[in-house]
């Protein structure tokens, strides 16, 4: 997958993670992924987790979308 990258999680992501958990109610791991996504400006995700649909501006894709 040539367009797939790995992004570090930073301590500064924790505040965004906490906000996401109280606002959108994802699991902690997903809230941390969301925080990193917001930080780097990538709001597209391939996931079966429908709670990402509650987050404005996030576009969730599934394998069936291809």
Image (cartoon, helix red, strand yellow):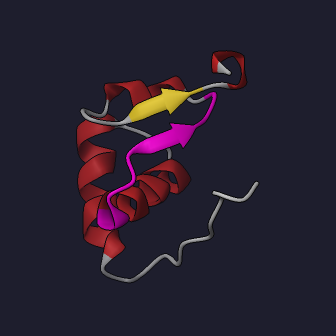
1 magenta-colored: no
Q: Relative to 39, is 11 above or below?
A: below
Q: Quadrant of the N terminus?
A: bottom right
Residue 55 position in % (x across, y down): 30, 34
Q: Quadrant of residue 63?
A: top right
40 magenta-colored: yes
Residue 38 position in % (x across, y down): 31, 57
Residue 17 position in % (x across, y down): 34, 60
Q: Magenta span covers which residues?
A: 39-48
Q: What is the residue that sits farthest to the right in this orientation?
A: 1
**Looking at the image, which is closer to me, 1 or 29?**
1
Q: Relative to 43, is 61 above or below?
A: above
Q: Residue at x 49, y 57 (%)?
A: 33
Question: On the rendered structure, is 27 left or right of 47?
Answer: left
Q: Residue at x 33, y 26 (%)?
A: 54
Q: What is the residue that sits farthest to the top in this orientation?
A: 64
Question: On the rendered structure, is 37 left or right of 63?
Answer: left
Question: On the rendered structure, is 49 left or right of 57?
Answer: right
**Looking at the image, which is closer to me, 60 or 2?**
2
Q: Relative to 8, is 64 above or below?
A: above
**Looking at the image, which is closer to me, 55 or 45?**
45
Q: Relative to 50, is 21 above or below?
A: below
Q: Quadrant of the C terminus?
A: top right
């Amino acid at each position: 997958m040539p367009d797939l990258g790995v992004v570090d999680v930073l301590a500064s992501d924790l505040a965004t993670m906490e906000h996401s958990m109280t606002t959108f109610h994802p699991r902690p791991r997903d809230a941390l992924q969301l925080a990193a996504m917001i930080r780097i400006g990538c709001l597209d995700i391939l996931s079966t987790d429908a709670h990402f649909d509650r987050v404005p501006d996030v576009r969730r894709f599934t394998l069936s979308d291809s």
